[in-house]
Amino acid sequence: MLEEPRSGRLTAWGNALIAGLAAPDNVADEVIAGDTVHRVSGLPGEPAPVGLTLGLGRLRALGVTGLRLALPVPGHPLGLSGPPDFNARALAAGEAVVAVGGPPLGLVPEVREAGPRGDVHVEVEWHCLEVRQGPPADVPSLGEAERELAEALREATAALTKLDVAGSGPAAQAALDAYRARAERGREVLAPGYPPRAARVLELAQRVAALVAIATGEHGAAVSASEIAARAELLRPVERTARRAQVAAYNAYVEEAERRKG
């Protein structure tokens, strides 16, 4: 998971919009990023798909007070609360956004690509579906996530060294160089309204996820399928910790709002 998930961008900037801390057009630009267009379908009261700005405004008008991120994988429905149909769609996409307040709704992205290599147009349709009200599965607090990440980073770094990823060829070296450049850029993360601790946790979680992605790719000293599978098994707990921490960081806005309400 080297790139920011679309559902993460929608969660962070959607929360900024709902809080009145970012202008609608700026929010749309941040969420769409390098894609061509985003639309929202299935919204209550909207018979046809609408643009992202109108869709987020409609959610706010319906009483939505915040957005949560879900990053599920098979066997780990991280951030989901049901029902089965929504969970299945979110699992297939590997991500989803769940509304807080207002009607129980969730958004799952469907990504469509068209065009030749080098000129690919990406369209995203956010399917709005009913969700089950309840606590999201296995989401840690921000403090818990930060503590877990420190150990996870040590484990991931040790695994990279043990697997000799850096000395295993140009592809691995390019991946490491790209990771280092990303880490050194110090790019802004999250959106207005998030506490600095959330940004710090997200940066660290993305660093751990990047190291795991490099280590479990087709790089390093392992060359056989069995060795690659063993490497992935070794780093699975680290990857899980990084995903949980990313969700905790994106959901920190809602966590803080709920804490203030008592």
Image: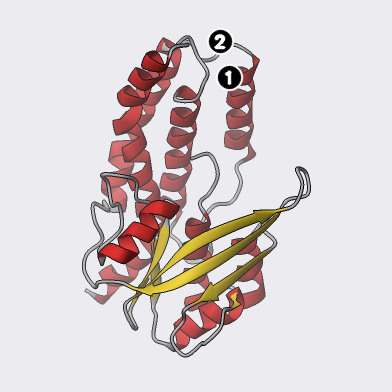
In-image side of 162 versus 190 (left or right)? left
Q: Amino acid at mark 1?
A: Ala
Q: Residue at x 44, y 47 (%)?
A: 202
- Would you say residue 121 is visible in this rendering? yes
Residue 26 position within the rendered picture, expressed as x and y whole percent measured from the top left:
65, 70
- Would you say residue 23 is visible in this rendering? no
The one of 4 and 127 positioned closer to us in this rendering: 127
> How would you rate the neighbour count of disc 1 (Cα within 10 Å): few for under 14, some for 14-19, many for 20 or more?
many
The one of 173 and 108 positioned closer to us in this rendering: 108
Residue 98 position within the rendered picture, expressed as x and y whole percent measured from the top left:
37, 67
Residue 176 position within the rendered picture, expressed as x and y whole percent measured from the top left:
58, 24
Query: What coloring was used for the rendering?
Result: secondary structure
Q: Residue at x 40, y 53 (%)?
A: 92
Q: Which quarter of the picture shows residue 240?
A: top left
How far apart, in angstroms, are the residues tagged by discs 2 and 1? 6 Å
> Badge 2 is on which residue?
168
Q: Residue at x 38, y 60 (%)?
A: 89
Residue 59 position within the rendered picture, expressed as x and y whole percent measured from the top left:
46, 81
> Badge 1 is on which residue?
172
Question: Which SS class for mark 1?
Answer: helix
Question: Which SS class for mark 2?
Answer: loop
Q: Residue at x 61, y 57 (%)?
A: 112
> How would you rate the neighbour count of disc 2 (Cα within 10 Å): few for under 14, some for 14-19, many for 20 or more?
some
The quadrant in which the C terminus is found is bottom left
Q: Amino acid at mark 2?
A: Ser
